[in-house]
């Protein structure tokens, strides 16, 4: 039995030869997320600063110009660096901080769910009430609109804007902080191979 388990483990460990794929896919998944978020903020920069600083309808953050500049730099710069696999661990730090700020200041008050649902362990009174509104919206659209055309690209939903996405991105960034950019298809790997004395392949 032990021999069989050892053989199975040896087969499993063949996957280590392609372990570079996981950090590569994490990087490529996050690139458009941060590129779109950063360039949208940059394209409407003054609106972003106002939103960061306004305590009534915005986030009420201190030093909104500085905070907005740092967020844009982290997201746009992060997207570029993640694409290249350059300074992967270093850029993961400000991006994780950005996700923490977003989760706490924007999403936490809405609970976990990104999309409202009336069932499941993370459903709240807020999301359950939203489903009643969603049913009403669908009824209005079915009566007064071309419902099939309106929904052919996807279902009508109500955004709950909970911490689900921010937390997911945070976990992915934490994995990249631990793994680095990955072997072979990252600048980090080749810089480490060229300039570092030990066998560390990513940075």
Image (tube, helix red, strand yellow):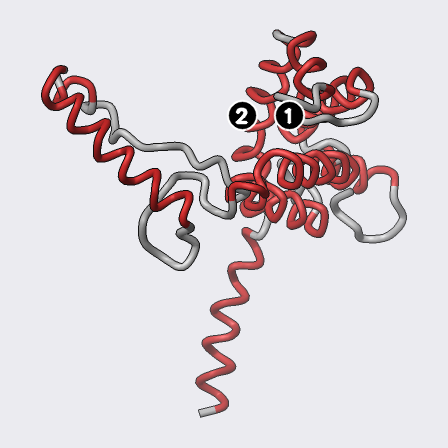
Q: Residue at x 47, y 83 (%)?
A: 5
Q: Secondary structure at mark 1?
A: helix
Q: Are marks 2 and 1 in contact (CB under 8 Å)?
A: yes
Near-viewer residue (9 or 84): 84
Distance between mark 2 and mark 1 Cα atoms: 7 Å
Q: Is residue 21 left or right of residue 178?
A: left
Q: Is residue 47 left or right of residue 201?
A: left
Q: Quadrant of residue 147?
A: top left
Q: Residue at x 78, y 19 (%)?
A: 64
Q: Circle 1 sits on which residue?
A: 79
Q: Position of residue 132 (x, y in %)?
A: 27, 39
x then y, percent, for residue 146: 12, 16
The mark nearer the N terminus, 2 or 1, is: 2
Q: Which mark is residue 11?
A: none
Judging depth in this view, the residue of 23 and 124 nearest the camera is 124
Residue in the foreground of this view, choosing between 114 and 83: 114
Could you tell me which secondary element the residue under label 2 belongs to? helix
Please give left or right for residue 112 compared with residue 65 in the image: left
Q: Residue at x 55, y 28 (%)?
A: 33
In the image, residue 111 above or below residue 66: below
The quadrant of the image that shows the C terminus is top right
At x 65%, y 31%, the residue is 82
Q: Position of residue 4 (x, y in %)?
A: 44, 85
Q: Position of residue 139 (x, y in %)?
A: 15, 28
**Which residue in the protein does label 2 denote?**
32
């Amino acid at each position: 039995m032990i021999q069989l388990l050892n053989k199975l483990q040896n087969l499993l460990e063949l996957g280590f030869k392609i372990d570079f794929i996981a950090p590569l896919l994490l990087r490529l998944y996050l690139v458009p997320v941060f590129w779109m978020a950063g360039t949208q903020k940059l394209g409407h920069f003054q609106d972003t600063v106002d939103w960061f600083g306004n305590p009534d309808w915005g986030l009420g953050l201190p030093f909104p110009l500085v905070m907005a500049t740092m967020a844009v730099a982290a997201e746009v710069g992060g997207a570029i660096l993640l694409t290249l696999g350059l300074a992967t661990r270093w850029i993961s730090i400000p991006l994780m901080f950005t996700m923490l700020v977003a989760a706490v200041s924007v999403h936490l008050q809405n609970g976990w769910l990104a999309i409202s649902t009336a069932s499941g362990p993370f459903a709240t009174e807020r999301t359950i009430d939203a489903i009643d509104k969603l049913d009403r919206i669908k009824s209005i659209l079915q009566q007064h609109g071309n419902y099939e055309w309106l929904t052919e690209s996807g279902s009508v939903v109500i955004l709950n804007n909970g911490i689900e996405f921010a937390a997911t991105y945070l976990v992915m960034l934490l994995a990249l902080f631990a793994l680095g950019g990955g072997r072979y298809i990252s600048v980090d790997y080749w810089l480490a191979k060229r300039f570092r004395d030990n066998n560390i392949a990513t940075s």
